[in-house]
Amino acid sequence: MRTVLVKYFLLLSLAMVALVDDTSAQHASDVQKLNVEGDHFKALATYELLPSKKIVPEAKIAAAKSAWALGLNRQAADSFDSILRDPQLSPDTRARLTLSRAVLEYQEERYQEGCLFAEKAVSLLSEPSPLRGRALLLWGQSFVRMRAYGNAEEKFSRALLEVQGGDKAEAHFNLGLVGMKLGKYTEAQRHLESIPMDHERTATAIRLLAGLSLEMKQIDRAKFWIEKGKNEYPDVFVDSWGDYGLLQVALAKGDIESARRIEEYSKKQYAPSDSWLVLMQAALEQAEWQRLDEPRVG
């Protein structure tokens, strides 16, 4: 339905461009400019009105990107494939377009095809670079979707050596995820702790670190991450899991009174059927029974 609507508005844009400004179809650079400005309907309309002799690779690429931005993924993929058949493309442009094809396949949940295009993009870049690092990242993410975690770990490890800025944090995050899947908890912890505090993955990483710390019986560390998450990233800790974690910390320290207070607070905040609340109550009940069974001194 969305594709049909987009095509309808594209036809409308074509008519408007033709009626309002005949000169807009005379310059291929207009397609690039409109794409950069985010006016994707008009960029495609302008491209369609270009005389064939004025269509240059840059305009084709801009039109393909506009189609992609409008959700016309199949049209964008076909356009990229057409451009990639041009033998005059520079190696860098070819690699970038091939990576775009990989991303398109990933978005369409065709992860095997995403792997193939990502591998091709990597092969086109003989030297380490941020671009090659991004291709390796996507290659690894495609493997994750196919649950090939060992292969994903190898790609993410290579990507970490080449990416820059926010992509480096993304590589650390993904290495943390696959490390958890592979049972490499210490390595996963190290990677997740390497994510800067201002990254979009930070909140999720803190929740994962709290869970890892509980799993590894690092009680003080778990308490630190849970409290930090609840205080600084409440949207990610909005459910009852954080309270469940704090109750587990209290029980691990033998602090039954604190555990009772957490359970009482949680009963007021969450529905009786809440899964983490049910687990809290079960854990507290078990701890109470164990306390009764302990031999009394004197």
Image (tube, grey):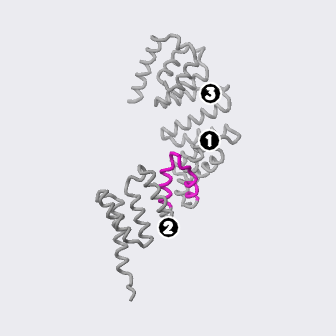
Q: Residue at x 54, y 43 (%)?
A: 112
Q: Which mark is residue 119?
A: 1
Displayed quadrant of residue 164: top right
Residue 231 or residue 189, whichever sits in front:
231
Does 42 sit left or right of 53 as displayed?
left
Alpha carbon distance from label 2 to label 1: 40 Å
**Real-space CA distance between mark 3 and mark 2, rounded to the nearest whole angstrom:** 56 Å
Q: Does the magenta portion include 191?
A: yes
Q: Badge 3 is on which residue? A: 85
**102 relative to 161, above or below:** above
Left or right of residue 276: residue 175: right
Three-letter amino acid code of the residue under disc 1:
Glu
Give the magenta part as a residue range.
187-212
Please tell me which residue is depicted at 53% across the width and 46% down the height of the picture: 199
Query: Residue 109 location in percent, x, y?
Result: 48, 41
Which residue matches tag 2? 217
**Crowding near pointer 1: few (<14 within 10 Å), some, many (20+)?**
some
